[in-house]
Amino acid sequence: MPNGCFVIILPLDSDYKVLGYYFKGGDSTFEVTSDLFLRLNLDHSKDEYNLLNLKEHIILSYLHHFTGKLNRKVSSIIIGLLLNENDKPEKFRAPLKEGAEEIEVLGLDILKISQEEFEQHLKEIYLEQL
């Protein structure tokens, strides 16, 4: 089971924003830095799924493009999982996509929701989907 997850939103009118994190064991030192975001964003320009092996973390991420009214304000989100060494990334592709679709259901509220509220929603997605 993955150690945690995170969501990055890519608005059309501003820079990226980390919507929230959820870690299975509570707090973690993991943080989405600008360098990590640039690497994820570059890798996602080639493929919607990405597996990134870092020194301390293995990250499986999915780029989800929004549709409808939400697409006028936000182009997409990146939802990422922090995997353990023995986790099989292929097993988490469909749940990542389903989790991203569940986040899209929030609609334009995604732009106004507080980080605490979103992290509660992310925890529910993690426990149900991932």
Image: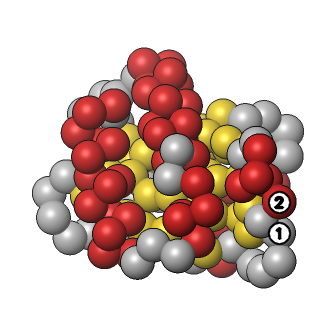
Q: Residues within 10 Å of mark 1 (few under 14, many from 20)?
A: few
Tell me the CA gap for discs 2 and 1: 8 Å
Q: Residues within 10 Å of mark 2 (few under 14, many from 20)?
A: few
x, y (%) of residue 35? Answer: 67, 73
Viewer-closest of 67 and 14: 67
Task: Kindly indicate whether the residue at mark 1 contacts the one at mark 2 (C-beta within 8 angstroms).
Answer: yes
Q: Residue at x 15, y 64 (%)?
A: 26
| Residue under label 1 | 12
- Name the image quarter holding the N terminus: top left
Q: Earlier in the sequence, mark 2 or mark 1?
A: 1
| Residue under label 2 | 72
Q: Residue at x 52, y 76 (%)?
A: 112
Instruction: Identify the image quadrant of residue 63.
Output: top right
x, y (%) of residue 96? Answer: 49, 34
The answer to whether residue 53 is above or below residue 30 is above
Res. 22 visible in picture: no
Count of numbered badges drawn on the protein: 2
Viewer-closest of 19 and 68: 68
Q: Residue at x 83, y 60 (%)?
A: 72
On screen, residue 46 versus residue 39, left or right, reads: right
The answer to whether residue 99 is above or below residue 75 is above
Instruction: Please identify, in this view, whether the residue under mark 2 or under mark 1 is nearer the observer.
Output: 2
The answer to whether residue 110 is above or below residue 61 is below
Query: Circle 1 sits in a helix, a strand or a loop, which is it?
Result: loop
User: Which amino acid lies under the numbered mark 2 shown in the image of this protein?
Assistant: Arg
Q: What sort of colour scheme is used for the picture? A: secondary structure
